[in-house]
Every structure is written in C-alpha cells, then in structure tokens.
Amino acid sequence: MFNLLFSQHHQRVIIASISVLFSSVLCAEQKPYAPENIQDVTIVSAEEVIEMILANPDLIVIDSRKKTEYLKGHIEGAINILNTRLTREELESVSADKSREILFYCNGTRCLRSSDSIKKAKTWGYTRLIWFRGGWKEWTEKRLPVVTD
C-alpha cells in the first residue's frame, strides 16, 4: 500500500524524516544527568537559594548557561558566565577571595554546565561553592521571580 501511495523518492524522504525524528527523541532521552553531588560542595533547593540571597544580598550567583538562555530569563543578580568560557582570571575578577560563597546553576539535572564550572572553581582553590542542582528548570517550575534582559 505504501509503495502504491508514494513515489520511491517520497518514500525515502518520509523514511529519512521519521529516522531524524526518532534519533532526536533518542538523543534527548540519552542526555546525561548531572552528578548527584560534588565532593565538598553544598547542594541547595530553589527555596534555599531565595533564603541565601535574602540573607546575603551580595551573594555571588553564576548562571552557567548560554547567553541566549540567560537573556530569556535568569535569577536576579546572577552573572552569566558560560562554563566553556569560565577562566580562572574571570572568576578571580568576580571574587578574588577564594573563601567567599559562590552559587552556580544552569538548566537543571540534565545540564552539566554548572557542575563543570564548579569543578573548575575547585581546581582553582575556591572552597565555599554552592550548587543549585535543580537550576533553571526547578526555578521556573516553582514560578519564582525571573529577570529578563
């Protein structure tokens, strides 16, 4: 029946389209999870992030997502530094004090950007690192305040 309804060219196009659709679904499902924890790093929830910011308005919050994602919405006061662009010099310009608390987040548990940034910061000697592992996904699901640029 399939052969009768569509020409051979159209059949190839349909099969290729279906293959692309299924491969993208499989890739999305195979996207790795962020680690459950990182040694010597405090993991916090969205509610704890709010408490920390209210208790310490000068808390450094680093959004490790892409600039386009950051511009669509971020936590108020967050500094956007993509994990792949984070350098020791840039982090030192944000905080030369390596014992100062720094909170990192990205898109959530299926995103590795903030955990990557934290691992870099640890190797550079930063000791009071905080990870909002649930990240932007948890923040928006809980309908917490968002800043857009």
Image: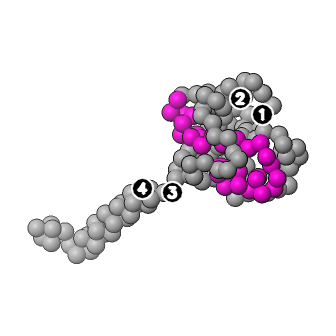
- Please, what is the three-letter code of the amino acid marked with disc 3? Pro
Q: Which of marks 3 and 1 is nearer the N terminus?
A: 3
Q: Earlier in the sequence, mark 2 or mark 3?
A: 3
Whole-percent x, y for residue 100 in the image:
83, 40
Residue tagged 4 = 29
Q: In the image as oriented, which residue stretches furthest toward the right?
A: 96
Q: Which region of the structure is painted magenta? A: 114-142
Q: Earlier in the sequence, mark 4 or mark 1?
A: 4
Q: Which of marks 4 and 2 is nearer the N terminus?
A: 4
- Please, what is the three-letter code of the amino acid marked with disc 4? Glu
Residue 59 image label: 1
Mark 1, other Cα within 10 Å: few <14 / some 14–19 / many ≥20: some
* Displayed quadrant of residue 30: bottom left
Whole-percent x, y for residue 111 in the image:
56, 51
- Please, what is the three-letter code of the amino acid marked with disc 1? Leu
* Measured Cα–Cα span from mark 3 to mark 4: 8 Å
Label 2 element class: helix
Instruction: Decide which of 47, 27 is in the foreground and name it.
Output: 47
Residue tagged 2 = 52
Instruction: Decide which of 149, 34 is in the foreground and name it.
Output: 34
Label 4 element class: helix
Q: Do the residues labelled 1 and 2 touch (CB within 8 Å)?
A: yes
* Quarter containing the N terminus: bottom left
Residue tagged 3 = 32
Q: Do the residues labelled 4 and 1 touch (CB within 8 Å)?
A: no
